[in-house]
Structure formats: C-alpha cells, structure tokens
Image (cartoon, coloured by chain):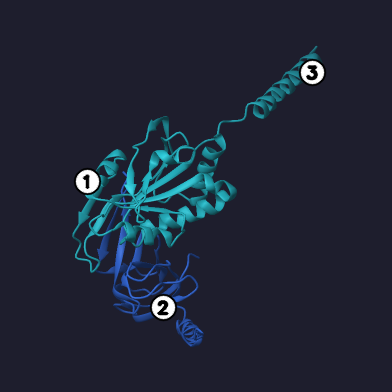
Chain colours: A blue, B cyan
C-alpha cells in the first residue's frame, strides 16, 4: 500500500501560506512541536507565542481534529517535587511579550488521540485568540 | 641579601606550585553528583509486581544493574512523557553502558492503568523500558516505600480526573541501595553523567 504524499504536501503548502500571512507586528506562533504518542492516549503540543502588539491578547480556545478534545494545561512542579496539572480557561499575553509553552509548564493537551502521532508527521492545531482570531498551526511531531 | 630573599621566595613559590600540581594529578577530586546524593546509601524498597506478560518483576533480581524508577500515569501528557523521553536520551548517551541500566515506570493510577496500558505507554519510547501496574494494595506499599505522593484531582478536564504526583527519578545502585534522586527538569546530560559514574564505580 502506498502512502499518499498529498496530505503532507497540502500541509506543507498551507504552512508556507500561513507563515507568509503573518506580517511583523501581529501576534504569531513559532517553534511548534508535538510529542509522539499513540492513539487512545493523550498528547501534548508546545510552541512560542509572540505578541509584539501594544494590546493584550488571550488564548480562549484550542481544537484539533486528531483528538476528542484539546485543552490548555499548566504543569506546576512544587518545591517538594510534586507535579500538578491545572486546566487553563484562558492564557493572557501582555503587550510586547513572549510566552513559551514548554515541557513542565504550559502546553496544549490533546485528549484521547484518534490516531497515532508518528515522529516526522505533523499535527494540525487551531488556536483561537480574543483579538488575533483563529491561528492554524502545523506542529511537527518529534522533539526539536 | 635582598636578591637572596627574592631567590628563596621564587623557590618556595615553585615548590608550592609543584605540590598543587602533584596533588591534583595523583589525588583527583571525587566526582560530584549533580542529582541529590543519598549518603549513606539507603535500603531501597524491594518490590515485586506482575508484568503485562504475567511474569513477576522483582527489584532484587536487578542487582548488579543501576535501576531508574519514575512514578507516573498513562494519561499524563506532559511531565511523564518528558521524563520517558529523558530516559531515552540517557540510554543513548550511556551507549555501551546502557545494558547495565534498567528504566522502570510505575503507575500511580491503577484505577485506569492496566499492566497492558502501562507497557504500551512506555514501550512506545523504548521496548526495553519496563512499565508496571498492579492492584492498589500492591502498589500502595511501593508508593509508601519511596515516599511517593499521589492525589486524584477532579479538575473539570475532558481528560477526566488528573493526578498530582511526585515527579522525581529514583536511582537504585548495583547493590540495591537507593543512591540518588533527580528532580524533574534536571538536564538529561547531567542525569546521564551521574548514572555513568555509578556504572563505572563497579
């Protein structure tokens, strides 16, 4: 069975278009990646949010076709070494700021994956911001 | 007279330097562990849990190897995969020493994690990693034995309940003693260096 190259090409072209669309001065997402994971389990997506504008923005919703649900969570490690995860309704981005979603901190949790996330593939994720609106990202699967 | 004093000072300085060099060369500084060293080494809790294939995994059978243990759960998307990914990096860095090291993941959520679930979860990172579950009663003694904190949290997440849990890596030496712990977030390189040192000691 031959694996179609079409989805990959389409996503690549889309990434180029999306990257091309974001002009300097707008809220943007970069350095996205997703952890490899298996269908039925949960996944995580990480990225950098840059808000170079003079106004505060907020991430109010996330969704992805690869999972039953997607939520923003924050992992917190206490001084005694206990980790807890807290779902975040919204994440605020101050004017002229950068916020990193990274292991052990903020991340998008993909709940009950409906497909395996293989290293080398990409995950499509839609991030909805209060001001910037919807931003679609293609997160390569695998640690950078 | 003055010249003689300077001459003597020079000789003394050179001798001093020679001694410093000799001490450094012949008595190297002891390795400094980057994780939290347990001194003197403590007895580790010798658990036995049934694997997904029905065989029993006993910690005491691993004597002669260094064993890394992490407690987590299969629904955990961030901290647990990050640690398992670190295990994979450590294994890679140890290269030919890696066969003297065991990587073990024990669930703190047996209500959801069957032995099969845990095995699938960890083997996705490396087939040699050991994933263990069991009954709450069996596991309670293991959690207690390593002072592992765990608590169920109803968070309103679509994922169901979440678990708060201790996120340290426990390191058992070749004699079966608890020798080191690594806090979450410690660089994989630093953990690998400590493990390589433990392996080298024997």
Quickly name the residue at label 2.
Answer: A137
> Where is residue B196 shown, x and y percent of the image?
54, 42
Mark 3 and mark 2 on one chain: no
N-terminal label among 1 and 3: 3
Tell me, for residue A121, which label it has, or none.
Answer: none
Q: Nearer the viewer, mark 3 or mark 2?
A: 2
- Whether residue B66 is visible: yes
Quickly name the residue at label 1.
Answer: B137
Mark 3 nearby-residue class (10 Å; few <14, some 14–19, many ≥20): few
In the image, what residue occupies the spot 51% across and 51% down?
A: B90
Tell me, for residue B7, which label it has, or none.
Answer: 3
Frontmost residue, B38 versus B22? B38
- Whether residue A104 is visible: no
- 1 and 3 marks in contact (CB < 8 Å): no
> What secondary structure is marked by label 2?
strand
Left/right placement of residue B161 relative to residue B102 reads left
- Using the image, determine if residue B193 lies above or below residue A104: above
Q: CA distance from mark 1 to mark 3?
A: 78 Å
Which chain letter matches label 3? B
Mark 1 and mark 2 on one chain: no
- Using the image, determine if residue A75 lies above or below residue B17: below
């Amino acid at each position: 069975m031959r694996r179609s190259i079409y989805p990959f090409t389409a996503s690549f072209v889309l990434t180029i278009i999306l990257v091309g669309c974001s002009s300097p001065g707008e809220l943007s997402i970069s350095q996205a990646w997703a952890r490899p994971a298996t269908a039925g389990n949960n996944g995580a997506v990480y990225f950098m949010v840059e808000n170079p504008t003079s106004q505060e923005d907020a991430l109010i919703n996330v969704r992805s076709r690869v999972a039953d649900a997607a939520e923003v969570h924050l992992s917190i490690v206490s001084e005694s070494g206990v980790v807890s995860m807290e779902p975040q309704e919204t994440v605020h981005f101050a004017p002229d700021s950068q916020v990193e979603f990274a292991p052990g901190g903020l991340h998008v949790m993909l709940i009950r994956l409906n497909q395996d996330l293989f290293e080398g593939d990409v995950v499509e994720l839609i991030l909805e911001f209060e001001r910037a609106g919807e931003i679609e990202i293609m997160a390569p699967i695998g640690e950078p | 007279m003055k010249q003689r004093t300077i001459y003597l000072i020079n000789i003394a300085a050179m001798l001093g330097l020679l001694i410093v060099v000799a001490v450094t060369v012949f008595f190297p500084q002891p390795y400094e562990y980057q994780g939290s060293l347990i001194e003197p080494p403590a007895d580790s809790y010798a658990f036995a849990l049934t694997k997904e294939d029905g065989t029993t995994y006993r910690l005491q059978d691993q004597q002669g190897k260094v064993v890394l243990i992490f407690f987590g759960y299969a629904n955990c998307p961030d901290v647990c995969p990050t640690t398992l990914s670190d295990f994979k990096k450590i294994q890679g860095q140890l290269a030919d020493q890696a066969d003297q090291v065991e990587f073990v993941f024990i669930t703190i959520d047996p209500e959801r994690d069957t032995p099969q679930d845990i095995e699938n979860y960890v083997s996705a990172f490396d087939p040699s990693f050991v994933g263990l579950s069991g009954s709450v009663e069996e596991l309670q003694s293991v959690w207690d034995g390593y002072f592992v904190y765990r608590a169920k949290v109803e968070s309103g997440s679509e994922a169901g309940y979440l678990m708060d849990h201790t996120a340290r890596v426990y390191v058992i030496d070749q004699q079966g003693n608890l020798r080191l712990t690594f806090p979450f977030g410690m660089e994989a390189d630093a953990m690998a260096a400590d493990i390589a040192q433990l392996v080298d000691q024997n």
